[in-house]
């Protein structure tokens, strides 16, 4: 049983704000919890029954790095990795043949994390090396989150353990359990900080933001320090978090009905205290740019195999760009950089990929792809899954 102070205790809130500010300065990570609610200490995966903190049990890991890119101009027309059928296309233009046509995934360092379902209906991800070989297969439930640098992922194991992984080749030393015994509808949506999620490691540490699927329980975050609490403390708790920047600005859904939804951009560390930058019932907010200045959005009500458009909103919630495929839908979107978002489209021309700029430009950069059909996407963007 936790001996944490009551979450409604304002003094506990102030203590955690001070502690989090010090952590951010010392370790360059941001934990979006703002109340000192003590949860399950992040513990090494090697000892799932241990109650000891990683401060005494953790080895000193090597420092993982993000995806390596060769010097010189890229041969790829887009700035992030993507899948096309059984081909993994790197941002540097390298093409890697795969044994499996993955349903999606992300990139962890120089590895592909490829998601698929086995014959028994279990959801798995493969750790795929740069040469296309599978080095490990991990069962998991809904959600696969990644930090901005693509050096740490988070996922929920079938037994309810919320795990982080940053160096799969070191086995249990390269992963940590952040929380245990979570319900099966929990879905991690964002990782802040990293690469290592061990609490005691100098200059590292992380936090995982996660949603519940019951439509009632507010989203939470859990940090390497075992602090597990809600993420929004202004007004009513939101239903879910859709995305987060590296410094903890959150895109949230506040309400959802058969007629639409209301959403907002929440900054827990604004100069005037935690507040919403803006709220809107005109758009559903999808993904926030790395610098937090723009958000990809679509219509407020979601239904069907895709969306009718993707728009870009500025930091006041005003629309500055829009892509509306004629006779088709947008399916996936991922920020390429601070200034452009990539969008996959399925329309009369088949599967294509577009770049939508914050300057209002919209350019087709790939396609049509021969890999897709009416059911299977021709392209899959390797952001979070």
Image (cartoon, helix red, strand yellow):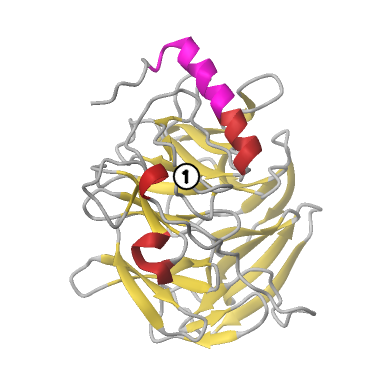
- Magenta highlight on residue 37: no
Asked whether 76 or 178 is in front, the reply is 178
Residue 24 in percent (x, y) is at: 61, 36
The answer to whether residue 280 is seen in the rendering is: no
Q: Is residue 181 above or below residue 96?
A: above
Query: Residue 130, image x and y in percent?
Result: 52, 81
Residue 29 screen position, x and y as percent:
59, 42
Q: Is residue 47 left or right of residue 197?
A: left
Instruction: For the C terminus, give its image quadrant.
Output: bottom left
Extreme-left residue of the structure: 120
Say if 300 sits above or below 329 in the image. Answer: above
Q: Is residue 187 left or right of residue 289?
A: left
Magenta segment range? 7-19
Figure check: 316 above or below 356: above
Work out whether residue 202 or residue 177 is closer to the camera in this orientation and state it: 202
User: Is residue 107 visible in the rendered structure shown here?
Assistant: yes
The quadrant in which the N terminus is found is: top left
Predominant secondary structure in magenta? helix
The residue indicated by pointer 1 is 200
The image quarter containing residue 356 is bottom right
Percent across and percent down for residue 338 are 73, 53
- Whether the magenta-drawn stretch holds residue 12 is answered as yes
Tell me the residue at 30%/21% (across/down).
Answer: 3
Circle 1 Cα neighbour tier, 10 Å, few/some/many (<14 / 14–19 / ≥20): some
Who's the residue at 60% across and 65% down the image? 66
Name the residue rendered at 55%, 27% in the picture.
19
């Amino acid at each position: 049983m936790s001996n944490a102070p009551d979450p409604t205790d304002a003094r506990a809130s102030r203590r955690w704000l001070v502690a989090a500010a010090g952590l951010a300065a010392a370790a360059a990570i941001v934990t979006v919890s703002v109340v000192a609610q003590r949860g399950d200490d992040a513990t090494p995966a090697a000892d799932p029954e241990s109650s000891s903190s990683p401060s005494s049990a953790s080895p000193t890991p090597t420092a993982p790095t993000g995806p390596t890119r060769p010097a010189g101009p890229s041969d790829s027309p887009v700035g992030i990795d993507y899948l096309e059928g059984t081909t993994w296309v790197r941002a540097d233009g390298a093409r890697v043949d795969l044994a499996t046509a993955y349903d999606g995934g992300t990139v962890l360092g120089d590895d592909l994390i490829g998601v698929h379902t086995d014959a028994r209906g279990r959801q798995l991800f493969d750790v795929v090396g740069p040469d296309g070989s599978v080095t490990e297969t991990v069962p998991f439930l809904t959600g696969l989150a990644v930090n901005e640098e693509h050096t740490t992922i988070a996922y929920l194991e079938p037994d309810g353990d919320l795990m982080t992984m940053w160096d799969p080749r070191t086995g249990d030393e390269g992963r940590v359990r952040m929380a245990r015994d979570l319900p099966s509808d929990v879905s991690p949506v964002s990782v802040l900080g990293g690469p290592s999620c061990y609490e005691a490691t100098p200059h590292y540490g992380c936090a995982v933001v996660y949603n519940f699927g019951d439509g009632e329980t507010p989203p939470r975050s859990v940090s390497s320090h075992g602090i597990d609490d809600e993420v929004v403390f202004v007004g009513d708790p939101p239903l879910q978090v859709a995305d987060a920047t590296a410094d903890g600005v959150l895109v949230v859904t506040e309400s959802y009905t058969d007629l639409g939804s209301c959403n907002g951009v929440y900054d827990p560390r604004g100069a005037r205290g935690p507040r919403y930058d803006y709220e809107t019932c005109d758009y559903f907010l999808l993904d926030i740019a790395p610098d937090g200045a723009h958000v990809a959005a679509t219509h407020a009500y979601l239904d069907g195999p895709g969306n009718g458009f993707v728009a870009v909103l500025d930091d006041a919630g005003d629309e500055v760009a829009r892509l509306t495929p004629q006779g088709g839908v947008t399916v996936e979107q991922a920020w390429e950089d601070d200034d452009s978002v990539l969008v996959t489209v399925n329309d009369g021309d088949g599967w294509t990929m577009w770049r939508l700029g914050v300057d209002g430009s919209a350019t087709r950069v790939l396609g049509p792809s021969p890999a897709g059909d009416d059911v299977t996407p021709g392209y899959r963007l390797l952001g979070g899954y």
